[in-house]
Image (cartoon, helix red, strand yellow):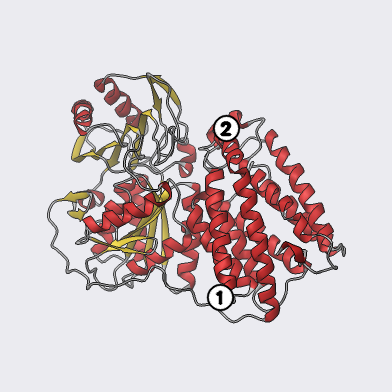
Amino acid sequence: MTYLFNKPSAFANELIEGFVAAHAAKVRQVPGGVVRSTRSEPGSVAVVIGGGSGHYPAFAGLVGQGLAHGAAMGNLFASPSAQQICSVARAANNGGGVLLTFGNYAGDVLHFGLARDRLISEGIPCEIVLVTDDISSASKEEREKRRGVAGDLVVFKAASVAAEQGHSLQEVTRIARLANQRIRSFGVAFSGCTLPGADRPLFSVPHGKMALGMGIHGEPGIGESDIPTADELAEVLVKRLLDELPDDIANAKGQRVGVILNGLGSVKYEELFVVYRRIAQLLDEAGIVAVDAEVGEFVTSFNMAGASLTLFWLDDELEPLWRAPADAPAFRKGSVRAAEPLEAQQIDVALATTVPPASVESKKAAQCLLGVLNTLAQTIVTHADELGRIDAVAGDGDHGIGMERGALAAAEKAAEMQLRGAGAGTLLQQAADAWADRAGGTSGALWGLALNALGTVIGDEKYPDARTVAEGVSKAKDGIMHFGKAKVGDKTLVDVLVPFSDTLSACVARGDEFGLAWQQAAQEAEVQARATANLRPKVGRARPLAEKSLGTPDAGAVSLSLIVNALLPLFTGNARDNVKPHEEQF
């Protein structure tokens, strides 16, 4: 269990505040995460890492000289939003461009991808490198689908040292990708973790068993076995990793490897050293030279009991990067030449967003959209537990919680923007960022993307008509499919969004009154949401448990169907091509 916390909802923010207070000489807080508090060379590349909180020392603890320049931090086990990532990247930027690197999780891929596009549009060169070291999460043939675990440290360090050596963004990116190609990790778990305020573990392992290959968010592994002795565990870990060498290495004998034995949260350091004793023997017996082995906690899973082993297959280019000195709050190697501290800076994290001018008609539409978002939020709150139950069948069970956080944040931001005189488009775009910020994860990214696309089409000039709304929904569909990489049949919300959008557009195009068009589309959404029960997931965390999910609809598809049907009463009984809800609703 988790013993020390105040409000569970405040835990992630308070841990960042305490972390920065304890390490002010190395890091400072910015909106969305932390950056170095020491000066970097002007014109150099900035390496920005990130992911959900709950994995300390990743990610904030790996910011400092010889390591990352900044870390974007989401809620517990939830990816940071694109807005948070951009905020950290802007603060870390030294003028030489930004490399974003992170573990290969769907929510992170979405949010960091959106952030990259936004940074480039602002004139900041930006590249992305995914860490894919966990051999249990996908086959060698589908290595691009593998998760990033303790190998994160290897890629972060190689890229950061290259950046401090003055290499270009293109060269830093190449080195990071090379490091990723030469790392392999495999882990085991003995028990799950319990987040603050929860009365049961987020995920569990049968008593007396060891889960092979379980992910750091509780993603399923490849099987279970009885808990072994320390020596037996070492043998399992080493054998798994030696069974898959990098493509350009034919024989392990004579190779040099960086080694990381990583505790996942509640396995004691003393236990890890007992295990590493046997790992060192096995590597020596195989004729492999261990270089600068690291034993400790580097990428954890809150208070999960387990451990992972990472081998970093070195060459003449990579070994100096692995052995280079570093001085971050949670990782120190050798001796760095201390950089000058930055001057104290006051950063107003609540800096008010500038509200662009809007027409009277658009402000009226904004008032109606506030009612729409309030109804949406109440619908999600009502069904959050059921959505979580559906998601837990083959996922991690957090869909309801994440949707609730996001929807409430969007409604709250919409109320603020409406009071400040925002137009409809601005209100939706600000609500989109608030949703993505608070929810995190894949659903946060997708709903933030959808609301932003809709707001962009609606704008701040006119009261939106039916055609404008249908076009906005279509743009949201296109954006989600582009960034989310899902298609119809993959068992995601796309299985509902596509037929809903297509039906809405077709009905509006033939001249149906908006309320009727929405009704037809909402009915189709409900049918398609139920139909996802017959599908096997092909993307996301549910993919490894495809058979288990049969018979249960997709949580994202169900939540979208619930929302569009709950909004139906707001759009009925109105004049043709007018999207105004009933006046009595507001």
Query: x and y percent of residue 105 in the render?
Result: 46, 46
Query: x and y percent of residue 5 in the render?
Result: 34, 45
30 vs 416, left or right, is left
Residue 39's place in the image compared with 388, above or below, is below
Query: x and y percent of residue 152 in the render?
Result: 34, 47
The structure residue drawn at horizontal position 36% and vertical position 47%, both measured from the top left corner, is: 6
The residue under label 2 is 393
- Between 164 and 190, the residue placed more toward the observer is 190
171 vs 278, left or right, is right
Mark 1: few/some/many CA within 10 Å (<14, 14-19, 20+) = few
Viewport quadrant of the N terminus: top left
| Count of number-bearing discs | 2
The structure residue drawn at horizontal position 23% and vertical position 39%, both measured from the top left corner, is: 296
Q: CA distance from mark 2 to mark 1?
A: 43 Å
Question: Closer to the observer: label 2 or label 1?
Answer: 1
Label 2 element class = loop
Residue 145's place in the image compared with 534, above or below, is below
